[in-house]
């Protein structure tokens, strides 16, 4: 029995997940303690309970059934996503929630999981060649449908996650480096263009070099490269032609210090909170930035400041370490499972969690622009928590079935 | 699943992310910890300065002369201030919106979170309006500060000086402990004793939340720094004598300086016209300030220490001292005064025909002819040297900054003024009787009277006798210089004899200075003035032996020293000495009463 459990249950994932959820609860308690939002803490406890059930549930679903149900679940979740636009609740300008009695559900959080499953299902067919346009387009279509629905809410942050996650997934599923470069280079060029001419020129030079080195289909390379240059130039052109106040918003997005009281306020306060924590932190419930509410709604997207300020480097490092261990574990499962569907699903889940972590922590420590997405397992929010725990459950499920073809 | 070399790329990316974030956390939390710690404190901890109570000022009898009272100052915390309320606030405070804007801007440069003072000394009506609309005026508050109240009828405007809101220039110069809107001693004692009077600001630390709302005191006020009261000053001033001196000059222009010859303490220092110090203690409206400055009688000008007028005949004693001490004449050397004195083709007239006079008689009747002859015999060099020995041409070193050194001409001075060899002895005769290029202040003259009263003992004149150090709980005496003039007792006796006769003998010019029961010594002077009436001078001291007060009186454009200045000198001395005897009589009576009770 004991050896069975050891074989069938991925204790590492379970332990890491539970620890992160616990740290999340501790942080949310602190963040809401003096902010008149302590009911959020109790709600999160309830969500944790539901999440535990969901996690175990996902873990126990027979893996074949899951594969068979992938498209169905995807379809259902899309219906819900569309439904939100019609009958959803609007919070801070985004129509992302369904309200059922006292509970608000955010379908876009769950759609991440179903989209991954659907893509995994699609890519696990034996004849898939991701260097061919139709398969590539098909894969993108799975993501683009929810992206469009989410952009209508609108929720830019979540949409970005959907697009970003595709790249590592298709590469894992066999797309060549050439294809990946061709896909990502326009995006790189667009971002580089915003930083100015020199970064843009350096970027396109690097992209050109990458195409040259890959020595694949010169025709497609030329098209992709032209598209890259074109997009970069148009982004610069658009930036130059929009009114100054729009430019300022873009500047503040890229560098919060240009607008310390507006768009940059949260980031500055967040770095101050983390920085002032020092090695061991100011002590639980003693963080002045946290307790005096210098970071609005800190319990959602800026939850990382709480361990950072109150437990210092020790606390922040622990959170970072656990999340990264989880990602390592995810890649490990993806590379050990025998089944291709399972492998792609595992990498998809890992990638989604990773992107959330990178964007969220990157924003909290002032390395990346502010994009409002939650930190997995720690941020307040039932849908995200339950969805993340289900992803952990999925990883555990795939681990348990790692030997199945 | 096929063998992926690709997984290593994924592991690498995760590792890189982990390393980058760890490095970033290390950088933020360990390298820049101090800086961020300070920023987070700045965020949540506000420092509120608490103004210290400025030191009180007492006179020599322990009477409170300069008091403090509450004053309300409105402040703005720039970080919380909504600039849209500027026009409304401006209308309440009766200032221009630009003024408020400028103040807030300046405050912002220092710190957005520290309140800047906008207007001090609010009246209760304005205060009530602000209190009423406070919820519409975020970031606006008021502080209770102290302002100066002047408790006695004596104004002593020029001696005490005024405090004023610190100027930008002073702020740049002193910086440190001062902030915009603070008051600083500007003139007189308030300025020269600023360091001891001002005390030390206290600081209170409070915790505020992100909205700037006060949550409570920071660490239960354990880190607060209490303000330290300024040190009190005990003056040599006698406020009653000062008031008498001032009233004696009412409607006149001039000055009275009375010094305690036993130690150099300033008993009274009056300069008229003067001004009411209390107009500076709150907010001084620019109109009042302009009016003061453009007043042709210059009320702000300290005539007692800053004027440079010829001293007239009061200065004859200096020449007599030089001649006697150098052995150039003795008491038998006589000049026959014919009422005029001819040098070259110029005739200098005297007011009277005195006939044959020797030095003591010449001082008594102030015979010009005698001194004309005497300076020719004595020479400029001795005259200059003895003037310098008496302290002329130098600052006395009084403990206020407004003081002139006056002008003591010497041959070098004349050489520069007229050119070498281009001036003749004829220029000297004016100096003999204290006219011409010689310039002295009433303070120097009072110091001169003190030296004569003391037979050569000079004490540096000083307004402040001691400073009460409230931390060490001890009174620190203010140190001052003293010296003995290099003139023999014999000469002093002769000079003083002359001064005795000036006041006490029939025919003396200073008979108006006599005081019943007290012997006075003195000398009058009438200084010619090319611009109008003569300036009247009197220097004197009393009692004649063991003097306790020495005075100098200057009344501008008032005519004869003997009639215009000597009576004021008498009043001042008498007030001081009689009050003293009155006091000692009271003490005697008390003793007798106690003695009787003992029986």
Image (cartoon, coloured by chain):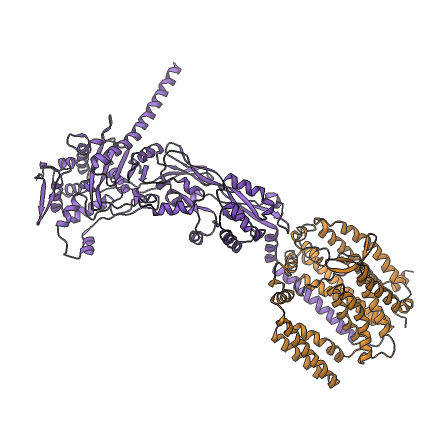
Chain colours: A orange, B purple
Figure label count: 0
Q: Is residue B321 left or right of residue B190?
A: left
| Residue A154 placement: quadrant | bottom right
| Residue B360 placement: quadrant | top left
Which quadrant of the rendered structure holds the N terminus of chain A? bottom right
Q: Is residue B599 above or below residue B56?
A: above
**Residue displayed at 54% across by 53% down:** B111
Can residue A328 be seen at all in this image of the molecule? no
Where residue A2 sits: x, y (%)? 90, 60
Q: Is residue A318 left or right of residue B310?
A: right
- A136 or B31: nearer the viewer: A136
Where residue B208 sits: x, y (%)? 62, 48
Can residue B123 be seen at all in this image of the molecule? yes
Q: Is residue B576 above or below residue A22?
A: above
- B60 or B158: nearer the viewer: B158
- B164 or B516: nearer the viewer: B164
**Residue displayed at 23% across by 35% down:** B564
Which quadrant of the rendered structure holds the C terminus of chain A? bottom right
- A393 or A160: nearer the viewer: A160
Where residue B36 sits: x, y (%)? 61, 57
Q: Is residue B432 above or below residue A392?
A: above
Where residue B394 sits: x, y (%)? 27, 47
Q: Is residue A343 left or right of residue B64?
A: right
| Residue A199 placement: quadrant | bottom right
């Amino acid at each position: 029995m004991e050896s069975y459990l050891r074989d069938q249950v991925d204790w590492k994932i379970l332990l890491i997940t539970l620890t992160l959820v616990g740290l999340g609860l501790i942080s949310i308690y602190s963040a809401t303690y003096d902010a008149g939002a302590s009911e959020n803490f109790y709600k999160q406890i309830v969500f944790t309970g539901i999440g535990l059930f969901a996690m175990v549930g996902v873990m126990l679903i027979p893996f074949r059934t899951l594969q068979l149900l992938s498209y169905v679940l995807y379809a259902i979740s899309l219906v819900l996503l569309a439904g939100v636009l019609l009958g959803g609740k609007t919070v801070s300008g985004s129509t992302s929630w369904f309200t059922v009695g006292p509970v608000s559900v955010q379908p876009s959080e769950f759609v991440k999981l179903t989209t991954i499953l659907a893509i995994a299902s699609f890519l696990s067919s034996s004849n898939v060649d991701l260097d061919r346009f139709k398969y590539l387009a098909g894969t993108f279509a799975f993501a683009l449908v929810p992206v469009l629905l989410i952009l209508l809410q609108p929720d830019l942050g979540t949409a970005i996650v959907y697009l970003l996650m595709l790249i590592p997934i298709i590469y894992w599923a066999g797309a060549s480096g050439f294809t990946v470069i061709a896909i990502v280079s326009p995006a790189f060029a667009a971002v580089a263009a915003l930083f100015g001419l020199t970064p843009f020129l350096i970027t396109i030079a690097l992209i050109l070099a990458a195409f040259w080195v890959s020595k694949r289909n010169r025709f497609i390379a030329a098209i992709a490269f032209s598209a890259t240059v074109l997009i970069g130039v148009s982004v610069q052109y658009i930036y130059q032609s929009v009114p100054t106040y729009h430019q300022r918003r873009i500047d503040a997005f890229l560098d919060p210090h240009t607008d310390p009281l507006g768009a940059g306020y949260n980031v500055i306060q967040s770095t101050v909170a983390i920085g002032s924590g020092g090695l061991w932190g100011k002590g639980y419930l003693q963080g002045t930035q946290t307790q005096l509410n210098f970071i609005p709604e800190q319990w959602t997207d800026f939850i990382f400041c709480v361990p950072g300020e109150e437990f210092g480097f020790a606390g922040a490092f622990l959170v970072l370490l656990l999340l990264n261990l989880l990602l390592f574990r995810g890649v490990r499962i993806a590379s050990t499972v025998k089944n291709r569907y399972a492998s792609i699903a595992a990498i998809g889940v890992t990638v989604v969690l990773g992107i959330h972590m990178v964007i969220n922590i990157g924003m909290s420590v002032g390395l990346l622009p502010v994009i409002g997405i939650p930190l997995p397992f720690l941020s307040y929010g039932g849908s995200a928590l339950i969805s993340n725990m289900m992803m952990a459950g999925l990883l555990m499920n795939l681990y348990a079935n790692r030997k199945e073809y | 699943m096929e063998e992926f070399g690709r997984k290593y790329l994924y592991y690498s990316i995760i590792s890189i992310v982990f390393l980058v974030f760890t490095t970033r956390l290390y950088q933020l939390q360990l390298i820049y910890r101090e800086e961020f710690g300070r920023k987070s404190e700045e965020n949540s901890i506000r420092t509120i300065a608490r103004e210290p109570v400025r030191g009180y000022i007492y006179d020599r009898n322990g009477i409170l002369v300069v008091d403090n009272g509450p004053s309300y100052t409105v402040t703005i915390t720039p970080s919380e201030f909504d600039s849209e309320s500027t026009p409304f606030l401006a209308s309440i405070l009766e200032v221009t919106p630009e003024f408020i804007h400028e103040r807030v801007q300046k405050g912002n440069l220092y710190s957005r979170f520290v309140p800047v003072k906008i207007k001090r000394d609010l009246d209760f009506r304005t205060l009530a309006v602000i209190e009423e609309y406070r919820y519409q005026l975020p970031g606006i508050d008021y502080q209770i500060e102290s302002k100066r109240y002047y408790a006695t009828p004596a104004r002593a405007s020029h001696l005490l000086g005024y405090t004023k809101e610190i100027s930008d220039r002073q702020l740049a110069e002193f910086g440190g402990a001062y902030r915009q809107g603070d008051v600083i001693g500007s003139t007189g004692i308030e300025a020269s004793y600023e360091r001891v009077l001002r005390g030390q600001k206290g600081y209170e630390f409070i915790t505020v939340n992100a909205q700037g709302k006060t949550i409570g005191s920071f660490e239960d006020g354990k880190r607060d720094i209490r303000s330290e009261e300024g040190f009190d000053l005990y003056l040599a001033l006698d406020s009653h004598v000062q008031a008498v001196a001032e009233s004696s000059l009412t409607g006149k222009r001039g000055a009275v300086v009375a010094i305690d010859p036993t130690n150099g303490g300033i008993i009274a220092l009056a300069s008229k016209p003067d001004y009411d110090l209390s107009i500076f203690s709150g907010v001084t409206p620019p109109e009042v300030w302009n009016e003061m400055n453009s007043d042709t009688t210059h009320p702000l000008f300290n005539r007692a220490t800053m004027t440079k007028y010829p001293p007239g005949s009061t200065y004859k004693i200096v020449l007599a001292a030089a001649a006697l001490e150098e052995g150039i004449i003795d008491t038998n050397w006589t000049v026959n005064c014919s009422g005029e004195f001819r040098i070259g083709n110029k005739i200098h007239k005297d007011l009277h025909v005195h006939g044959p006079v020797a030095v003591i008689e010449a001082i008594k009747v102030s015979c010009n002819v005698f001194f004309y002859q005497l300076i020719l015999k004595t020479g400029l060099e001795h005259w200059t040297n003895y003037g310098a020995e008496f302290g002329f041409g130098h600052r006395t070193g009084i403990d206020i900054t407004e003081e002139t050194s006056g002008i003591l001409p010497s041959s070098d001075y004349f050489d520069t003024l007229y050119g070498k060899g281009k001036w003749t002895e004829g220029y000297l005769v004016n100096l003999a009787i204290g006219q011409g290029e010689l310039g002295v202040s009433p303070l120097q003259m009072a110091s001169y009277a003190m030296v004569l009263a003391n037979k050569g003992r000079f004490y540096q004149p000083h307004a402040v006798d001691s400073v009460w150090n409230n931390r060490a709980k001890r009174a620190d005496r203010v140190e001052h210089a003293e010296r003995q003039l290099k003139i023999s007792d014999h000469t002093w006796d002769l000079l003083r004899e002359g001064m005795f006769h000036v006041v006490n003998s029939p025919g003396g010019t200073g008979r108006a200075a006599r005081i019943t029961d007290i012997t006075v010594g003195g000398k009058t002077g009438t200084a010619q003035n090319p611009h109008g009436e003569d300036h009247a001078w009197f220097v004197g001291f009393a009692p004649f032996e063991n003097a306790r007060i020495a005075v100098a009186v200057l009344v501008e454009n008032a005519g004869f020293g003997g009639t215009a200045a000597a009576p004021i000198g008498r009043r001042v001395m008498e007030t001081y000495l009689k009050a003293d005897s009155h006091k000692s009589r009271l003490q005697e009576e008390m003793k007798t009463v106690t003695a009787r009770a003992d029986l």
